[in-house]
Image: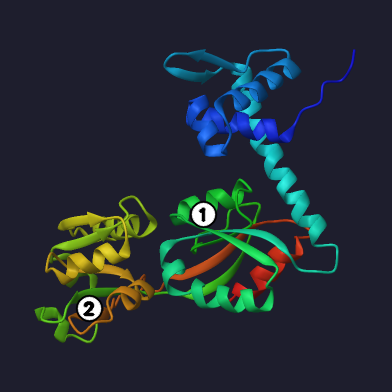
Amino acid sequence: MATRRLDPYSLRLFASAAEEGSIARAAAREHLSASALSRRIADLEHAFGVPLLVRSPLGIRLTDAGRLVHARGLQLEAGLDALLREVQSHDGRVSGLVRLCANESSVIGFLPERLQRFRQAYPEVTIALQERLSDEVLRACLDDATDVGVAVAHAVPAGLDAWDFADDPLAVLLPAAHPLAGSDSLRFAEVAQQPLVCVQSGGALDRQLRERAAATGLPLQVAVAVHSFDGVARMVEAGLGLAILPRSAARAYAGAPQFARRPLAEDWAPRMLRLYALHKTPRPAAVAALIEALRA
């Protein structure tokens, strides 16, 4: 019996259909006609000898075999991308694509200048940067969905390597006319008595503040919760509350005279950002070069 060959491109198209839940939406995403994409998936089903999709007027859903092909297909695509990067690293040039996943405070506070210097040193390397919560960054590293991650320092999970990236302690942001703005620094108990503007509910900083409040018996008076540090600055500027946020974010979004920034005088206020990467030997040259360039 002749061996049926699998086409990586068809696997990618199948993954798009699985993720979109629709042949038409997947075709638009991949810039193909719906009929062409449907034929590719039919060829895959012929190669495997089993149906991968259940088609209906409401869309498509995966069969059990389809779910397996989707998961393994994503792994194969990631492996092929890694192979390409590793081969490119052996031709004497540092080139190729490096996937970088980073939390918001590193993106706004530290990465732009460091990436610009890296780009000048390695013009043939392309950086694909995605912003994620710190927990999501670590998961992406463990899943080999990113080559390098930047996140708040945690206990290093098994299988990852870690390096210091930047010191980014917590600070208090408040309107310049606020009564507490006259202090050189502020304790958490003082801030917790005020209405607060919180960021990224469920994120690392949000959890830390709620844990500290619970440990000290101080109920947080959350006035408003937003998804980004620039949103925090706007809410504080409007007088809706005070905020505890990384110093880098306070500098980036609240440098105007209407704001006051004060250190948070607590032993847990120091905050380190770290680089994380899945342990590999050897690393692709471009990945190793980026890690070296970003290390503190």
Task: Look at 24% across and 69% down and name the residue there.
Answer: 233
Type of the residue with mark 2: Leu
Residue 178, image x and y in percent? Answer: 11, 78
Real-space Cα distance between discs 1 and 2?
31 Å
**Dot 2: what SS?**
loop
Residue 282, image x and y in percent? Answer: 79, 60
Residue 152, image x and y in percent? Answer: 46, 63
Type of the residue with mark 1: Val
Task: Look at 58% across and 34% down and name the residue there.
Answer: 32
Q: Nearer the viewer, residue 253 or 93?
A: 93
Q: What is the quadrant of residue 45 in the picture?
A: top right
Residue 148, image x and y in percent? Answer: 61, 60
Q: Nearer the viewer, residue 18 or 135?
A: 18
Which residue position holds label 1? 137
Task: Look at 59% across and 32% down and name the residue there.
Answer: 15
Answer above or below: position of 118 versus 151: below
Of the numbered discs in the image, which one, if any, rests on residue 38? none
Which residue position holds label 2? 186
**Dot 1: what SS?**
helix
Q: Is residue 123 left or right of residue 294?
A: right
Q: Nearer the viewer, residue 12 or 236?
A: 12
